[in-house]
Amino acid sequence: MTRTMATIGTKWKPIIIYTIGLKKKRFGQIFALMSIISKKVLTEQLKELVEDKIVIREEFNEMPPRVEYSLSEKGIELLTILNQLTLWNQKHHELEQQNEQL
């Protein structure tokens, strides 16, 4: 569990993974969808996710330079788990709200 939290336990990494999702995205697209994160932090977090082989960084030899980010197989598997956690949270949040109304 400690290793898992070291890999994805930051405030932003699960949100970045969820934001990239199943479609390739450029840095600007990710940043626009996550407007409350600074460019510096997004850059650092993406770099770590690439190093951990959760995200793939693909550079294109074009002018101007173009870089796209996508989830690796490992990242897609993690996205599935994050989706399950989201469903779990929604279920229990709804139950708590129902109990509060009683």
Image (tube, rainbow, N blue to C red):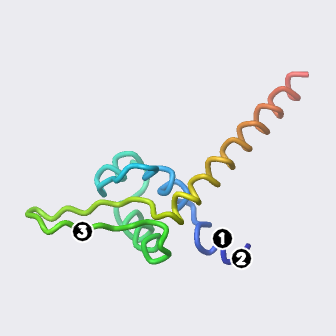
The residue lying toward the viewer, choosing from 16 and 53, is: 53
Residue type pointed to by label 2: Thr
The residue lying toward the viewer, choosing from 70 and 2, is: 70
Establish if 62 lies above or below 37: below
Q: Position of residue 24 (x, y in %)?
A: 35, 53
- Residue plotted at (39% across, 45% down): 33
- Residue 59: give its label: 3
How many dots with numbers?
3
Establish if 50 lies above or below 24: below
- Residue plotted at (31% across, 49% down): 29
Sequence-first tag of 2 and 3: 2
Sequence-first tag of 3 and 1: 1
Residue type pointed to by label 1: Met
Q: Secondary structure at mark 3?
A: strand
Q: Secondary structure at mark 1?
A: helix
User: Disc 1 designates what residue?
Assistant: 5
Q: Secondary structure at mark 2?
A: helix
- Residue 66: give its label: none
Residue type pointed to by label 3: Glu
Q: Residues within 10 Å of mark 2 (few under 14, many from 20)?
A: few
The Cα–Cα distance between marks 2 and 1, rounded to whole angstroms, is 5 Å
Determine the residue located farthest toward the right in the rendered image: 102
Q: Position of residue 88 (x, y in %)?
A: 74, 44
Establish if 76 lies above or below 101: below
- Residue plotted at (47% across, 56% down): 16
Q: Residues within 10 Å of mark 3 (few under 14, many from 20)?
A: few
In the image: residue 14, left or right of residue 37: right
The Cα–Cα distance between marks 2 and 3, rounded to whole angstroms, is 32 Å
In the image: residue 55, left or right of residue 7: left
User: Disc 2 designates what residue?
Assistant: 2
